[in-house]
Image (spheres, coloured by chain):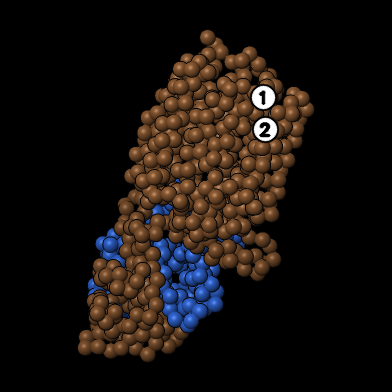
Amino acid sequence: MDLPELLRRLSGYPHVVVSWIADDGYPAQTPAHFAVDPAAEQIVLHDTGQAVPTDRTLNVIASHIRPQPGVGYDQRRYISVWGTGERADSGVRIKIERHWGWDEDITPFPEYVERSNPQARRYLEELSIERGVELKPRLSPFWTFLLATRLPFLTATVVPILLGIAVAGHAGEFSLWLALATLVAGAATHIGLNVANDVFDALSGADEANVRPTQFSGGSRVIQRGIVPLQRMIAISAAGYAVGGGLGLYLVIETGSLLLLAIGVAGVLLSVFYTAPPLRLVHRGLGELTTAVGFGPIMVLGAYVVQTGELAWEPFVASLPVAILIALVLYVNEIPDRPSDAAVGKRTLPVRWSRETVIRVFLIGSVAAFTVVVAGVATGLLPLATLISLAALPLAIQVHAGIRKYYESPYELMPIMGRNVQLHFVTGMLLFGGYLLAIAI
Amino acid sequence: MSWIPSAVDDLLKRALVAELSVVNHRGETSTHPLIPLWDGEKIYLTSSVLFSRKLEHIKRNPKVALAVTDPVACDGLTARCSIQGDARVLEDDPHSTWEDVLPLWRAKEPAIDFFISKRFAFPLFFERSIIEITPRRVSWWADGNPTREPQVANAGQVA
């Protein structure tokens, strides 16, 4: 905040507290009434009963809260300035030399917290050295695992795999054991991907630069908050890929399908090079396409091939709506990350495009997702019952309206991002339900 | 009987915000708004490690002062005070030591229990230290008028 703006805001406070180091070494304080002289960029303290010295640095703070009885308070803001004073006609004039402050209406509390992460880590590191034991924020193993792996996002894997299994079931092929193994392999690989994504974003500085993360964007933050060290995240990612890859190989051997091997290898490569150098697909504006292919056709076809041993057009068409909608999840989640992504050269589509283009492409994408279902049914590729997925259309309308309204407001966009995740999940599960209906009928 | 004047005792009991001045690394005062918690003998403040510069300053120089001056944040009380004292930082376990003053905190900010239940979302915010202040000298303006000379009481005197 520049000085004229700071003085303008300061003039809105009813009084200040002035402090200085007294001769006995203790800070001395006095409340004071004051005026602001914008032309001279000075504060004029009115006379106080306790004399304010003019031979040393003064710190002047104005602070405000609004009490909320029975709850606490809100509207936190304060301005703190430093300077030396000189005696004036009826008080002391202070020439401002430095200033600092916080206003939660300008910098929301979550952003203020994120900006302070480096100070917290430094303080805990110094305390750890002093004590000889490592001090870091503690969370239960459950919460740590949930946060580090971003477990709730596994719906992106569960939906297409269930859909692939259902399409195969509709074709008359189903093995419960192979279905479970596919789900676990897919989930483990997804965990490996999520954690690898955090590792590479930590190494590139993208997550550190992002001071406005939300629960849907900006990574898990466990590295930035010092909860899980980078090395452990690398180990978790490797373990996820190892379990996913091992189970994938088992499925290849069990089914004898080299096609499945090709699909699995393509999936793992896409997930690794999503953020890993040298390809860094997400940095090149290819994140949405990579996500669509990986969490759409690759997962649906992979699950289908595990059950049937062959490829077909039906699972490919069925995969397209979930592919488009999962790409739109990433796409909308990238909207609040634009400044930090741009700062580290992560040229996502919302970084490259204008606000209007981003919103228009969301509309085109979501309409396309539902058009595929209608076209699939019309051409006889998808069963009639999959039309129940159209019941999710109102969610798409809500998300479209939400991103238009809150495009520049990360925290107000959060519920919209949540609704967008629901759009993918509900549409996918309705498609799955449509297939179950078709099997039952 | 406490030597703290009853007007100051009232302010400390009710204040939702107070201004803590510490001696910073430049040898100047640096002032931070915090919730004062008062048990009738010592003043407690808590600080997250996120905003821990004041803790570093106190460890270097424990001399502090705390002002309570805002009638809006004091349930309408118009008196004002400044308390000089010696501070120490209590942080045996930053994860839980601060919970010792949670009952005092809860009394002033009941919503804190809600935020604690969401602790996983702000883990560093709940790694905290207690700043314990032993008052040495109190200046107060009974009518809140800072143009008057304050009354003064020192530790050991009976109010």
Q: Residue at x 37, y 51 (%)?
A: A408
Question: Are the residues at dot 2 and dot 1 in contact (C-beta closer than 8 Å)?
Answer: yes
Instruction: Report the residue at 66% width, 37% height from top.
Output: A266
User: Which quadrant of the figure contains the N terminus of chain A?
Assistant: bottom left
Which label belongs to residue A124?
A: none
Mark 2: give few (<14), some (14-19) or many (20+) Cα within 10 Å.
some
Query: Of the residues shown, which amino acid type is indicated by label 2?
Result: Ile
Which type of secondary structure does the marked residue at label 2 adopt?
helix
Q: Chain of mark 1?
A: A
**x and y percentages locating residue B56 in the rendered image:** 54, 72
Left/right placement of residue A16 relative to residue A322 reads left
Q: Position of residue B106 (x, y in %)?
A: 43, 53
Among the 4 quarters of the image, the one containing residue A24: bottom left
Q: Position of residue A82 (x, y in %)?
A: 38, 79
Q: Which residue in the protein does label 1 denote?
A: A305
Q: Are marks 2 and 1 on the same chain?
A: yes
Residue A13 sits above or below residue B146 on the image: above
Residue position for label 2: A263
Which residue sits at x=56%, y=13%? A439
Eyeballing the image, is B107 above or below A216?
Answer: below
Of the pair A241 and A114, the residue shown nearer to us: A241
Tell me the quarter of the picture where residue A261 sits. Answer: top right
Which subunit holds the residue at mark 2? A
Q: Which chain is blue?
A: B
Q: Which chain is brown?
A: A
At which x and y percent is residue A421? 48, 36
Q: Nearer the viewer, residue A51 or A232?
A: A232
Q: Earlier in the sequence, mark 2 or mark 1?
A: 2
Figure quadrant of residue A8: bottom left
Kind of element beneath mark 1: helix
- Along the line of sight, which residue is nearer the eye, A88 or B40? A88
